[in-house]
Image: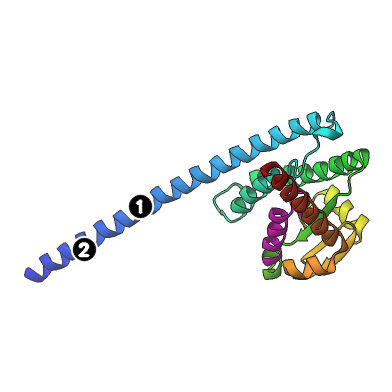
Amino acid sequence: MIDSKKYIITFLITAVIFGTAIFISNALGEKKLEDVKSIEDRVALDILSSETQFALLEETSCKDLGPGFLSKELGSLGEKLAYGDNQTELNNDNLEYLKRSYFLLEIKDYLLMKRLTEKCGIEPTFILYFYSVEESCEDCEKMGYVLTSLRDKYPDLRVYSFDYNFDVGAINTLISIYKVEPNLPAFSINGQLYYGYHSVEDLEEQAPALQDLALRAKALETATASSSSQETE
């Protein structure tokens, strides 16, 4: 009789613990879904905002053309979508739609900035980065961090990232134009192709476009320091 009571009590305690664990797991799952849905909604609004901004930028004058016009905004969108990629709860159709919109937004920004820089006689530095999420690509992830560091270091540098295997005709056209082989990660710096992982230092030494960018940044820093010194005097 005592053994029966012991088994019943043990069963009840186990059932309560198990039920509590299921409740907590479901609650956390619902919270995660809400967080992901919130990110999805914000990305959609950001895309709409950026598309509207494009129409306004087409009317801009050269004196209004400052460094890093939309690069930070695009970077923020990319980070949100990268987070969404890692959330299995996010509806795949919605994520595919948002990624498609984001990639097209990047291409629109690239074409717009090419037109604006040509119009204003500015020497731009563009990086078109191609990666893959269909297979394990550790170098793709590491290269992404390197390019983010470069973008933070040089505000005039514009970095556009694309999933090489994503089914968008415009991405396939970019791949065809720049003759990018499926040896990923791959990236084009002002038309010059590079494959595999490269550190920030490697790229600054190897890429002429980045060398020019570094020289311009140093000259601007020197001029700013000189101006500040004169004002102090």
Identity of the residue drawn at 64% across and 34% down: 45
Vertical side of 21 occupied by 115: above or below: above
The label on residue 24 is 1
Residue positioned 84% across, 42% down in the render: 113
Answer with the quarter of the image where residue 48 lies.
top right
Give the labeled residue for mark 2. 11
Helix, strand or loop for disc 1: helix
For residue 178, what is the image quadrant?
bottom right
Task: Rate crowding at label 2 as few (under 14), some (14 to 19) or many (20 or more) other CA atoms within 10 Å.
Answer: few
- Which quadrant, please, contains the N terminus? bottom left
Residue 96 coordinates in the image, percent (x, y): 69, 47
Identity, as a three-letter code, of the amino acid under mark 1: Ile
Q: Which residues are magenta?
A: 142-161
Q: Are marks 1 and 2 in contact (CB under 8 Å)?
A: no
| Quadrant where the C terminus is found in the figure | top right
Q: Main secondary structure of the magenta part?
A: helix
178 in the magenta segment: no
